[in-house]
Amino acid sequence: MNVNAVVKKAFFTGLVMTSLVAFVAAIWGALVADIEGVWAALVGAGIAFGLLGLTPLSILWGFKLGKGDILSPGFFASVLGTWLIKFVVFLAAVFWLGDQTWLERTTLFLTIVAALLVGLVVDLVVVARSRMPYVSDVDLPGDSANK
């Protein structure tokens, strides 16, 4: 499995799991706070997916900037810079949307946090199961490149 395949799998699995979190949170929000809870759950899941979607993009940008070397400063600048942007956007979204009357604040916050935690677990599982070699030019058993 190459880097692009791992990134695509993480992205699409994250999309599915974030959609599941949005569904569950919308039902919970409807039971707790009527339509404001539903809107809060959907907006929170959308924000979380947007933040999670930046992770695969930052990795792809990092590989381009670092010319395939994950130890290059370009790779670190891309990934860590994107992380910093995500942190600022998260804080801005929570504080700005928390004051909106058409959203229920607790549902919004809990949905964002739950979706981000689920996304982190998805990323962890996808990378752990990716079977990426630690060294280059090595064929792993079961890969299609083996002859």
Image (tube, grey):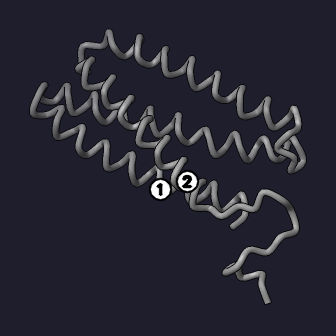
Looking at the rendered structure, the kind of residue marked 1 is: Thr
Q: Relative to 50, is 65 on the left or the right?
A: right
CA–CA distance between discs 1 and 2? 5 Å
For the view shown, which residue lies furthest in the bottom direction?
A: 147
Side of 22 relative to 138 (left or right): left
x, y (%) of residue 115? 39, 37
Pick the front one: 61 or 147: 147
Image marks 1 and 2: residues in contact by CB distance under 8 Å = yes
Place of residue 97 in the rendered image (x, y in percent of width and height, measured from the top left)? 37, 16
Tag shown at residue 39: none
The residue at 33%/22% (across/down) is 109
**Residue at mark 1:** 13
Q: Position of residue 39 (x, y in %)?
A: 26, 31
Q: What type is the residue that disc 2 sits on?
A: Ala
The quarter in which the N terminus is drawn is bottom right
Q: Residue at x 85, y 34 (%)?
A: 74
In the image, what residue occupies the spot 62% across and 62% down? 130
Q: Residue beneath label 2, please?
A: 10
In the visual, does 10 lie left or right of 43? right
Q: Position of residue 108 (x, y in %)?
A: 31, 25
- Using the image, determine if residue 108 lies above or below residue 7: above
Secondary structure type for disc 2: helix
Badge 2 density bin: few <14, some 14–19, many ≥20, Cα 10 Å: many
Q: Please tell me how many numbered marks the rendered image carries.
A: 2
How dense is the environment of label 1, judged by Cα within 10 Å: few (below 14), some, or many (20 and up)?
some
Instruction: Identify the residue at image location x=74%, y=74%.
Output: 140
Residue 29: image quadrant is top left
Q: Secondary structure at mark 1?
A: helix
Quarter of the image for the C terminus: give it. bottom right
Taking 147 as reference, is 116 above or below it?
A: above
